[in-house]
Image: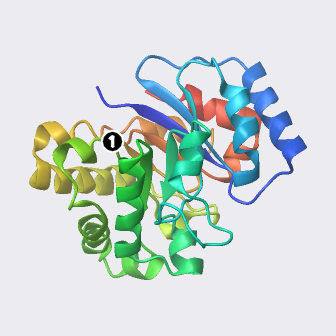
Amino acid sequence: MRKQIAAANWKMNLTLQKGEELFDDIIALPHELKADQQAIFAVPFPYLAMAQQKVHGRKNAFIAAQNCYNKKSGAYTGETSVEMLQSLGISYVVLGHSERREYFNESNQFLAEKVNICLENNIHPIFCCGEALSVREANGQNDFVAKQLEESLFHLSAEQIQKVVIAYEPIWAIGTGKTATSEQAQEIHKFIRSQFAAKYGVAVAENISILYGGSVKGSNAKELFSQPDVDGGLVGGASLVASEFVAIINALK
């Protein structure tokens, strides 16, 4: 059974003190993660150690970094290596977020290198893919997403690919208040799974978690997550509000 995941992406938000308060508020609210469910918190680099302490001993709760570099170590001032993340006990790292692609010009090949070094160090990539509004309006989303997957992930073995979490994020729905309908989300998630099935077989594809990321809120999470190929969400703004994120956790199927 594939994991159902509520993943919080704090982006570049909150002070350390506010982050601690947010964790305490989430922990205090009633929620329970079942055996096949996970809550993942992608926090800013300075808060990773604090976040690890907050989830220590908590069932099915994990911390993710929001990025990493594609080199093992060296003279790369300002970057963070996967070995550094591993030394903190970090389990996941978000790769290929649309903001990284747009603002930092991260290419599919560059992301493939990051995926490789994460898997070599037993860190699970949360690999983001998705199209801009212009691509969606031209009905080119399937080809666009297929190319992202092929160029960044399809060199992996069947064993490796099952260690990757996919996050589909329609760029036109991030921070805009617009959300894909549950039918639109299911359609593209089903297509993504079909690409993995064609490459690796149905059994492998059925074991890959595919999250939706685009203005997920407590009010729409249950409907989105009810779709058969939507395995949770990568949550931005709503993850900064304890009651909202707990509602999203509780909406997992």
Q: Is residue 216 visible?
A: no
Q: Position of residue 221 (x, y in %)?
A: 53, 39
Above-or-below relation of 132 to 224: below
Q: Quadrant of residue 100?
A: bottom right
Q: Nearer the viewer, residue 224 or 68?
A: 68
At x 43% / y 17%, what residue is drawn? 35
Which residue is under mark 1? Answer: 163
Q: Position of residue 227 (x, y in %)?
A: 35, 39
Extreme-front residue of the structure: 74
Colour style of the rendered protein structure? rainbow
Q: Nearer the viewer, residue 181 or 228?
A: 228
Q: Is residue 146 visible?
A: yes
Q: Element type at marker 1? A: loop
At x 31% / y 42%, what residue is drawn? 229
Q: Position of residue 59 (x, y in %)?
A: 56, 18
Give the amino acid type for the residue marked by disc 1 in the picture: Lys
Q: Position of residue 29 (x, y in %)?
A: 74, 21
Above-or-below relation of 63 to 146: above
